[in-house]
Amino acid sequence: MIPPRDITLLVNGREYSVQVEPRKTLADTIREDCGLTGTHLGCEHGVCGACTILIDGSPVRSCLLFAVQCQGTAIETVEGLATDGVLHPLQEAFWEHHGLQCGFCTPGFLMLAKGALDEDPSLTRDELREVLSSNLCRCTGYQNILIAVEAAAARMRP
Amino acid sequence: MSYVGQSVRRLEDPPLLTGDAMFVADLAFPDMAAMRVVRSPVPHGRLIGFDTAEAENAPGVIAVLTASDLDLPPIEIRMTKVGGLDPYRQPVLAKDRVRYVGEPVAVVIAEDPYLAEDAAELVWPEIEDLEPQLDPMVPGEFEDGLSSEVALVEKGYGDVDDGLAASPHVLEVELRVGRHTGVPMETRGAIGVWDPVEGVLHMFGAAKVPHYNRFAIATMLGLEQDKVHLFENHVGGGFGVRGELYPEDVLVCASAMRLGRPVRWIEDRREHFIATNHSRDQVHRVKVGFDHTGFIHVVDDEFWQDQGGYVRTHGATVADLTGAMLPGPYLFPAYRSRGHIVLTNKTPAGTYRSPGRYEGSFIRERILDLVAAEMAMDPVETRRINLIPPDNIPFDRQYSALATEVTYDSGDYGRLLDRVVERLGYAELRADLQSRRANGELVGLGVVCFVEKSGLGPFDEVRVEVGGEGSVEVITGAASVGQGVETAIAQICADGIGVDIDSIRVTHGQTDRIDRGMGAFATRVTVMTGSATSIAAAQVREQALQQAASLLEANPADLRIERGRISVEGSPGGPSLTLGEVAAAAAAAGANLTATAEFNTDHMTYPYGVQAAVVEIDPVTGGCRVTEYLVGYDVGRSVNPMLIEGQLVGGVAQGVGGALFEAFRYDESGQPLATSFMDYLVPTASETPQVDVLLSEDFPSPLNPIGVKGAGEGGINAVGAAIAAAVGDALGRQDAITELPITPGSIWAILSG
Ligand code: FES
Ligand code: FES
C-alpha cells in the first residue's frame, strides 16, 4: 500500500486539508473527506456524468480523477451553486420546469449545464441537447431538463 | 383554490437541487465497516470450497463470511406464489451450486470499501464447471431430478381450437422481447446497524416495500417484528427493480449483528448489471384467427419466459401479467395463453416498469399490424374494429391477475383513438410520409393502443395529524422512488382539510412511524394512498369544524376552512380561528385533531392509452431515429398534470431504450456481455424524442373517491409496440419486425434482403 499523502483541496472557495491514498478518486474524497455528498456516483466508469463537477470552470467527471491530481485547482460542486440560501437560476429552473424526478442525476446535470453556459450563454437548443447528452438520466426523458436549462440560460444571459 | 388538478411544483425538490438530499451512500455511522460481495465468475457449477486465508490476512479485513458461517434461509417469494416455486428460491449465499455469473458466494467486511474490494479479489471459490443452460425453450434440470421449467401459467376463455379451425385466415408468428431492465441511476445500497443493548436492528436504504421487507428480514434473522426497523432515504429511481429483498440486504444485517458494527454495502455499476433483477426476455409463438374484415376472432399464445438463475421475490408475476394483459383493449372473442417460466444460468429476472405489458403490447400490436398488412387495411382502422365498444365497459376479461379479477372499470377506447388521430393529423401525416418514402426516404408511422393497470390493493392506511402550530403531517406506509409521492399526497390532503400545501409534511417509508404499509409498486400510490389520504383529511376537517363550532359558538355546517383559517360562511371580517388554534384547543380538551383512515379495494383500475411514433431510418447504417412521439392517456382525474406528464415522458425514454438499444446478451459460455454503460446503452438526450402528451380525464375511475387511475407505467407500456410498427411501416415490411430491440444490425439485415 502506498502511504497516504497530505493535500489541500479548494472546494467552493473553501480549503480542505485531507489525508488520502494516492489511489483515492476525487469523487470519493469530496464525498467522504470533505463531507460534500451532493456529488453522486452512478457508474465510476466515466460514462453517466452523475459525478460531474467543475474544475477551473470546466465540467469534469470526478470519478475519473485522483484527489492528489487536483491540488491547486478551483473545484466547484453542487453545494456551491446556491449563494446565501438563494438558488442559482439553474436550480430555480429545474424546480419550476420539473427537470428532476428522483434527483440522483441532478447535481451532475446542474454542474454540466453551469460549465457550458458560463462558457457560452448563447447555446442553441440543438447545441444544448448535444452538451446534455454527455450525462444520463433514467427518470425524466430529458425533455424537462432541456427546457429548464434553456429557461435558465435566458435568465443568465447578461 | 384547489390544489388537485394543478401543476404544483414539487415539495421534494429543494434538497435534491442543493445537494442536501441523503441517498443511502451518503449516510455514515461511527465505526462503520464496508462490505464487498464475492461473486461467482462462472454461470453454472458445483461449489466445492473456498480459500479465504489470504483475504482474511489482508490489510483492514475484519471478516470473510461464507454460507457455512451464516445459517440463513433462502429469500421468500413475496408475490404471485403459484405452487411449487419454493425449491427455486435464491439462497443468500450460494451453498453447493452457483447458477449465474454474479451470484453472491461470500462477503468480505473491511475497514473501508477500497480495502474490502482489494481483499475480495483474494477469495478463491473452488468451482467445478457445469454445462450452462441458456435457452429457455430447451429446459434442463435445476438440480438433480428437478426440471428448470418452474411453472406453466395459463389463462383464457372461449373456444380457441374450434375458433382457429373456423377462421378464414390464420397467421402464425414467433416474436421476441429482449432482456433489459430498469437500471436506475443510483445503484442499490444498504446499511445494517445493530444495537446489542436494545436488541434492535436498523436497516437504511430501504425502498418500495419497507414494511414487507421488515417482516421478511425479521423472519430470516429470527427477530421480533418490532425489533427491526427499515428506513427509506432519498431513492435514486426504482422502476420495479429496487427495493425488492435481495441477498445483500440480508447480508448487511446479518454481518452487522455478527460483528457488532454498522456495515455498509454500496453496489457498483458492474455489480448492478449482473446482480440486480433483469426483466422481459420472452419468446412468444402466436396463432391468430381473423376474417376478411380484419376482425380477430382468436388469439392463441404460448410463451417462454427466461427468468434466469432463481425465482426471486416476484414469483410468477411477470408471466401472470403477460397472459392477463396481452389482449389489451381488444375484444378477441377467444383467447388462450400458456406461459412457461423457465430458469437458465443468467441473472435472475423480476419486474421492470410495466411488467408483462411492455412485452404483451409488443406481441398484441404486432398481431394487429400483421393482420392489417395481410388484409391491406389501414392499421388504425384495423384497431378500431377490434376495440371493445364503450357499451361493453365495464368489461370482464373472465380471468384474474395478481389474484384480482380483471375488469376494465371505465373508458371509451375508440374515443381516445379518435382524439389521437386528430391530434396527429393522421391522414395528412400518412400522406406526407408516403410521399417521402416515394422519394426514397425510410420513414414510417406506428399507432398502437393499450390498457394499463394501477391501484393494486388490498389496502392502504394513512394517519393525518395536525400539530399545535397548524402544521399537518401525513404518515403513510407507502414509499417513494422519486415519482413525486409527497407532492401528490400533500395536494390531496391540502384540499381535503382546506390548508396551504406548505403546511403539509408527508412521511413515508419509515416502519417506526406506522405499523402497516404496502409500499410503492404496481402504480398504486396515488390511487391507494391518495384515496386513504382524502378520507383521513375529510375526517380531520370534520373534527376541526366541530371543535371550532363550539369555540365560535356557531353551527359546524355554517363554517368553512380556507387556507388554514376557519370562519363563518358569508361573514367576512367576522370571528375566525386558525387551524393551529383549533388544534391547540382540541389538544387541551384531550382530543387531538388526528385521523387514521384506510382505503380497501379488491379491484385494480385500468387506465388506457394510445401511442404513436414516427421514425426515420438511415439507409446506410440501419440506425433508427424516433423523430416524433405522442402519448394519449386517460388517467381518470389528474392530481398534478406536470408530474403525470413527467412520468409518461420518462417512461417513453425507457421504452425507447428497450425498443432500440438495451440488451443483456450472453456469450455461448454464459458470460454476460453487457456489464457497463459502454455495452448496455441507455438512451441519452440525443436519442430520446420530444414527446407530446395528450392527457385525458374523460373517464374518472368509479373505484376510488378521487377518480384517479395511475400514470406511472403508461409511458413505457407500448413504446416497443409503437416503434416496431413505425419501423415496419418505414421498411414496408411489417412481417420482418419480430424482435426487440430493433438494432441497426437487424435493420441492415432486412434492408440487404
Ligand atoms: S460516476 Fe463518474 S461518470 Fe458515472
Ligand atoms: S431524475 Fe432520476 S436519474 Fe435523473
Image (tube, rainbow, N blue to C red):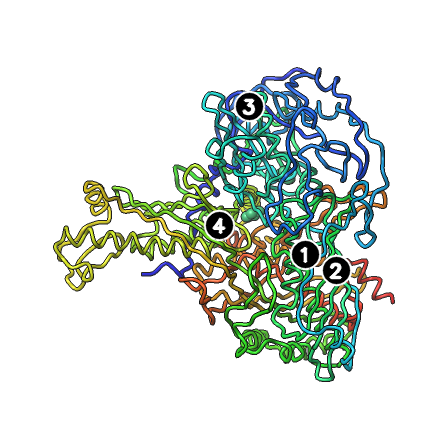
- For badge 3, the amino acid type reads Met
Residues at discs 4 and 3 both on one chain = no
| Disc 3 and disc 2 on one polypeptide chain | yes
Output the chain of dot 3: B
One can see residue A110 in this view: no
Which of B435/B189 is in front?
B189
Residue of label 4: A94
**Mark-to-mark CA distance, 4 and 3:** 35 Å
Q: Within 10 angstroms of label 4, few (less than 14), some, or many (20 or more) residues?
A: many
Please determine if labels 2 and 1 lie on a single subunit.
yes
- Residue position marked by numbered label 3 in the rendering: B32
Q: Are marks 2 and 1 in contact (CB under 8 Å)?
A: yes
Q: CA distance from mark 3 to mark 2?
A: 47 Å
The residue pinned by badge 1 equals B319
| Residue B240 x, y percent position in the rendering | 60, 49
Which of the numbered marks, if any, corresponds to residue B528?
Answer: none
Callout count: 4
Q: Earlier in the sequence, mark 3 or mark 2?
A: 3
The residue to which callout 2 is attached is B303
**Closer to viewer: mark 3 or mark 1:** 1
Crowding at mark 1 (Cα within 10 Å: few <14, some 14-19, many 20+): many
